[in-house]
Amino acid sequence: MRRSYVVDTTHSPGALLKPVALEGVQLRDRFWAPRIATNNAVTLPSQYAHCEETERIANFRRAAGREAGEFVGLFFNDSDVHKWLEAVGWNDAVSDAPALQIIRDAVVNDIVSAQDTNGYLNSYFSKERIVERWTNMDLHEMYCAGHFIQAAIAIYRTSGAQTALDAACRLADHLDATFGPASAGKRETSDGHPEIELALVELYRTTRELRYLRLADFLLTVRGHQKVGTKPFDRFDAAYHQDHLPYRELHEVVGHAVRMLYLAAGATDVWLETGDAALKRAIDAQWQNMTQKRMYVSGGIGSRWNGEDFGVDYELPNETAYTETCAAIASVMWNWRLLQGTGEARYADLMEWTLYNAVMPGLSLSGNEYFYQNPLANDGKHRRSPWFGCACCPPNVARLLAQLGSYVSSVDADTLWLHTYIQGDIDATGHGLEAAVQVTTEYPWDSTVRIKIVRGGQYGLKLRIPSWASGATVTVAGVRKPATPNTYFSVRRAWQVGDEVVVQLPMTPRVIRSHPALVHTVGRVAVARGPILYCVEQADHSASVAGLHLDVSTSWQVVDGSGELGYHKALKARGTHVTTTDDQLYVDWRRDAGIPINLTLIPYHLWANRTAGAMKVWLPLA
Amino acid sequence: MRRSYVVDTTHSPGALLKPVALEGVQLRDRFWAPRIATNNAVTLPSQYAHCEETERIANFRRAAGREAGEFVGLFFNDSDVHKWLEAVGWNDAVSDAPALQIIRDAVVNDIVSAQDTNGYLNSYFSKERIVERWTNMDLHEMYCAGHFIQAAIAIYRTSGAQTALDAACRLADHLDATFGPASAGKRETSDGHPEIELALVELYRTTRELRYLRLADFLLTVRGHQKVGTKPFDRFDAAYHQDHLPYRELHEVVGHAVRMLYLAAGATDVWLETGDAALKRAIDAQWQNMTQKRMYVSGGIGSRWNGEDFGVDYELPNETAYTETCAAIASVMWNWRLLQGTGEARYADLMEWTLYNAVMPGLSLSGNEYFYQNPLANDGKHRRSPWFGCACCPPNVARLLAQLGSYVSSVDADTLWLHTYIQGDIDATGHGLEAAVQVTTEYPWDSTVRIKIVRGGQYGLKLRIPSWASGATVTVAGVRKPATPNTYFSVRRAWQVGDEVVVQLPMTPRVIRSHPALVHTVGRVAVARGPILYCVEQADHSASVAGLHLDVSTSWQVVDGSGELGYHKALKARGTHVTTTDDQLYVDWRRDAGIPINLTLIPYHLWANRTAGAMKVWLPLA
């Protein structure tokens, strides 16, 4: 069995946890397994068609002079092809995809044919635009380079094919020859759109070429000199590009949300390799700022449409939430790296929450329509699209789904860590550990998780108890013990094959309120059950969603949902509907109990999969 | 006594009501009289100093070749000087202002010296920019022209001086020669920034030159052909300029709020002269749309920062409300014209409400600092400024204050209409009516209004009963009668000098809620008393404003306020303060009664006149 690691911290000195190979995780659940199957059967083929139709792949052939015509589209369109290619790479490890393998090799061939002899690779900066290379650091040249490097690594790790990886090394060598300390005769600047940093660290992990790690560290360190975003016609300022402060002095998440978190993920990767304490202090402050001041209840981030920006503390309007799907994915990537470095449950907790409630809303159940923005309340006009002019989100969701198995567990020398619970088989053999388990559960819909030992031996299990799981218990060898939320429950034994551990994670529906400073949700509550955030949608109510209120003293009913939304748990609750008899904007207040009504809440990530209609996450109190 | 009419509907066929001369109204109250005195003593002189310091007046001398140097500032800076000059004009009728008269004449001289022999007048389009005249209809040339025409009319009506008026006619003649039907060899386009329309109608009223009215009607009618805002580099689209639909088909208030309402006011002026029913139908629909879907509880309008735009229905966020002071003034102007045409109380009601709660927040008590934007909630960082690069609001407030007396009352052939109540003397003689009254009241702070007959005779009184005045009564000759809110109470008698009518307008504090579709205020209430909207401000509370809730079952105390905020009525109520013990953004909801606390509410228009601190109008329910 090939052992493909998505983020390969095998030799990272700062990584407490080591990866479990994609091939070792067989998911057989009702939530993720169908999504991953759809990713293989629908999402990846349809995205390829979009890339071809929009001439994104032809752009490479044209740059190579192998096809007539000019570059078409946005200057960073290469990156969408690279990200799709990375998704195809990882998908190869988890799905049976012979046709995609053939396409993959052809696309790699097209891309590599466009590479300059000096290693430079970007189809937009070809022909007459060759002279414009590296003249404007906000034209995403390094961003595109980073995505190609990641694609090459995915293909190499899952198939062993060297073509793309060799091209990636030539490209990285070109970057290394061009950017670096002025004292070495190089250009001292960073890119306008971070992403290259984490790609270079992964390339270092793949090749052990230290120059790549050094370059990543340099690109991080050189920030803060306001070299990007300060020319008169720049659309955005230095803070938008995270270039206003040296990274190690940046204690907030600021500017363009995707750029900020790709940068933070890259910085965390550098820290995993170097142990740089100043870097970790900045990262910790950023995480604190994000989770305590600048994050939606969904885990979504980046509230402002203008600049796709984090905005200021507590600037989290629901209707106009930007909350780009890519930003949520970047948060997953960042939290995963922090988890590998620390083994702290809070990172796994946020990662799981973000996956279910901020990433998955971005993808239709059909697997071929996407949200770019994920508002937390909407009048029903916001609908998913099959593609975008700026198509960053679709292939980003695809690559995350292809990687998903690798985020379920980690290992250290003598312990198997389970970060989330998905029914399936985990063979975590590697890094000195021999461990395999079978997980049986309907999680995230049901609270019982049964873990059966498939490979016996003396090793530990670390079982994550989510932050919401008050009253959680773990039963080992018939002995039931209480477990503390937001920690890992540890058990170490000489396991026999067939031994069973049962984790109980109570899933009473929870009513959530926000910090008083969050003005957009004062007097309202959100509802969650287990790791799933809920919402009300018009399709389930004859009364208008705008007038729905929740009675917090309700008894909750958890019911099986199916049909158009597939298998899930819906919630039934008592509420009221406040109607208005006229169109007056402002009227004298009167105690208006409203009309009693039964509410149906569905998982927020499932909204907009039925007839278009209003939706809201935050319910005013009845 | 000179009789200066601000909007002179004396001969307007469509005007049910006729104006009362500015000189006939002597305000002697504690609210407006000090403001008007400050306008004369502080505001107008300081604005003149700003106009000089920023070289706004020098620009005219430079354009005339009478002073060395180039044009300085924004391309529409002329309009600020014109609007200030208009204010000085009206102020002349109500204040003793000999120094301002001298400055006024000197500034008129400077402006007129810059006028081209062909009548064109705009100091920006002088010298080498003469060739650019009328090449881009969004460069506010007609907007500046309109403001000069209005200034000239104010000076002419209050002083009889002809210099500016003659120049205004030459300018209007130039416009008339340039713009009009293509069949007449003229240019068929309207201006990017409406305002000229109402100025031309007023010039027609002043000169009886029918061409000016025809041009106003043409500029209105030619709209809807998307001639402005559709070039590739135009910042805003045709709807922003109200050029996307023929005006008579425009049934919403859209785009830039000030432009929209100056246009609506101009259209109403045309309707007052022509009785054009199609125009009135469109105007009615726009008013309905504004008041039922696109207006803050303050009467403020134009919610979006981007484009200073109305936004869509129910897009009324509080913290980021744009609500430009100029837009509120435009609403006052529009509603005044509708009132003159219809005699319907709802227009006077909105006009009064907007004055107190959307215009007056724009001006500091000191009379020399201004808000451009008027948010309905703020963290305390938004403070008034002494001036702006784009300085439209300061002189707009100044001219409105100078005109204020003319908005108190109107007449028709046999009736004196009182639209609002301000202590003072009203000599409404004119238009065939001989009527004069003395008003004694502490309105807007107190509910009793005593109207004493100063000139006897057989005539009617129409006394407006505000929409909020449930339980209102009017006592005539000792007989007390109930009066219906949002109507005019009519009484007709053979008055003897000394007769007294007493209007009682109950001012119980009112708790207001919003339409359920207004998502930004769900679960919150606003508080008003009489025509005054209230808010909580940090200066009155040791607990943070963000955590303040109102207990709607409170008994209300109305207390005299004084000190820094001057004489006013403050409200005391019971509320709660919800604190948080940690920084967590989202926590499990629990019934949190908060800490009982006494709330002090101050008039919203007085906020930001003390130590900087948070403020909010909408209070969550305790």
Image (cartoon, coloured by chain):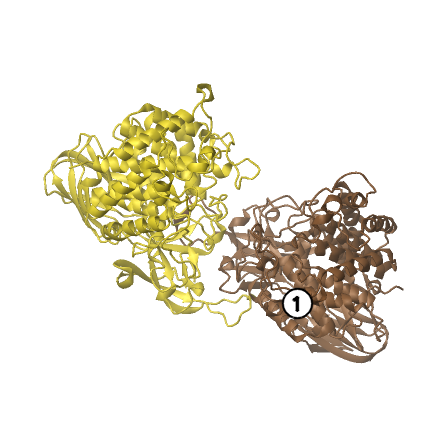
Chain colours: A brown, B yellow
Residue nearer the viewer, B454 or A255: A255
Chain under label 1? A
Asked whether residue B616 is in view, the answer is yes
Q: Quadrant of residue A452?
A: bottom right
Q: Quadrant of residue B78?
A: top left
Asked whether residue B484 is in view, the answer is no
Query: Three-letter amino acid code at disc 1?
Result: Thr
- Mark 1, residues whose alpha carbon is within 10 Å: few (<14), some, or many (≥20)? some
- Residue located at (33% from left, 29% from top): B170
Q: Which residue ends up furthest to the left in the rendered image?
A: B497
Residue nearer the viewer, A495 or A85: A85
Q: Mark 1 points at which residue?
A: A221
Provide residue A125's location: percent of width, then percent of height: 73, 48
Q: Relative to residue B209, is residue A160 drawn left or right? A: right
Q: Which residue ends up furthest to the front in the rendered image?
A: B68
Provide residue A607's location: percent of width, then percent of height: 64, 51
Q: How many labels does the image show?
A: 1
Q: Which residue ends up furthest to the right in the rendered image?
A: A1
Q: In this view, does A49 lie above or below B251?
A: below
Q: Relative to residue B368, is residue A537 drawn left or right? A: right
Residue nearer the viewer, B538 or A80: A80
Q: What element carries label 1?
A: helix
- Residue located at (46% from left, 27% from top): B222
Quadrant where the N terminus of chain A is found in the figure? bottom right
Provide residue B303's location: percent of width, then percent of height: 46, 48
Provide residue A258's location: percent of width, then percent of height: 65, 57
Q: In this view, does A406 lie above or below A71?
A: below
Q: Relative to residue B61, is residue A488 drawn left or right? A: right
Residue nearer the viewer, A517 or A18: A18
